[in-house]
Amino acid sequence: WLTNGRGGSLALVLADAGFDVWLGNNRGNKYSAKHLRLRDDDDEYWNFSFDEMARYDVPAMVHYVLRRTGQRKLSYVGFSQGTAQAFAAFAQDADLASRISTFAALSPAATVTGLSRSLIASLVSANVDFIFLLFGRHAMLPYAHRVRRMVSPALHVRLIDGCLRYLFGWDVSEMAPEDKELMYAHIFSYSSVKCVVHWFQVIRSQRFQMFAARDR
């Protein structure tokens, strides 16, 4: 949205074209870690998946923008999980959906494929209780940001590239090294373990579904 320069960042391109651009954000990452009453070491703080993002966060952002601008409708542009939570939000709230004039879903994430030969595939098939035992019930890989601060930008790029290849089988050779140094410092942030488990359930069931508390 912002890290690819004025000519290559969608938010800046739209703003330069005269649109009123509002940037949303998901709960629990490094840009939205505060809470009115909970601490980030409380279990309740991390007890969310993209169900809660669809039920509470997307409506809150949409209604906030409409209230502040005085408009009746807005256009929503989402990327990856930002599309998934929008699909879920608009499907369960007809009034909210009526407030959206255009929904642009970039890299829409209602299904996930291509991971059958990756390490992630073995975790996808694991019991949900095992995942929580392995990673806990708070942030997923919370030390990732500490590692970024400890190593050079070039080494951080090599670490992220290696993790993407090893975990997902992704090849990111189409990105220039200098672009990676800038983008990798911002685009990789943590979420809740429960949110990751929710995606594992979607992958395993091959259905775009709500979180299953009694998954087996």
Image: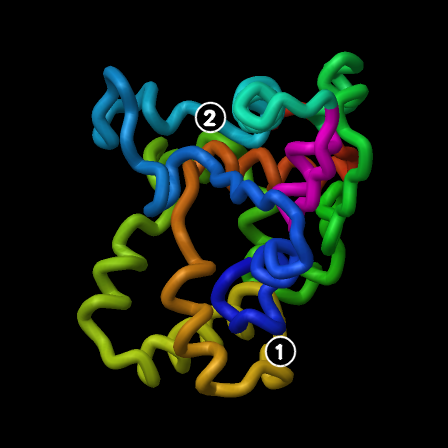
For marks 1 and 2, the one nearer the N-term is 2
The CA span between labels 1 and 2 is: 30 Å
Report the residue marked by disc 2. Answer: 48
Residue pictured at 69% horizontal, 45% vertical: 77
Q: Is residue 215 visible?
A: no
Q: Relative to 22, is 96 above or below?
A: above
* Magenta-drawn stretch contains 76: yes
The answer to whether the residues at label 1 and label 2 have Cβ atoms under 8 Å apart is no
- Residue 24: image location, x then y, percent: 52, 39
Residue pictured at 78% horizontal, 34% vertical: 207
The part of the chain drawn in magenta is 73-87
Q: Relative to 6, is 205 above or below?
A: above
Image-quadrant location for residue 118: bottom right
- Residue 109: image location, x then y, percent: 71, 46
Q: 126 or 199: which is nearer to us?
A: 199
Q: Image quadrant for the C terminus?
A: top right
Tell whether 93 sits left or right of 53: right
- Decide: few, some or many residues near mark 1? Use Cα within 10 Å; few <14, some 14-19, many ≥20: few
Q: Is residue 51 visible?
A: yes
Report the residue marked by disc 1. Answer: 171
- Element under disc 1: loop
- Decide: few, some or many residues near mark 2? Use Cα within 10 Å; few <14, some 14-19, many ≥20: many
- Residue 75: image location, x then y, percent: 73, 38
- Residue 170: image location, x then y, percent: 62, 72
Q: 187 or 157: which is nearer to us?
A: 187
Which amino acid is tagged 2?
Phe
Which amino acid is tagged 1?
Asp
Identify the colour scheme used: rainbow
Q: Given the current orientation, which residue lies at the most extreme left position? A: 150
* Magenta-drawn stretch contains 80: yes
Residue pictured at 30% horizontal, 49% vertical: 142
- Element under disc 2: loop
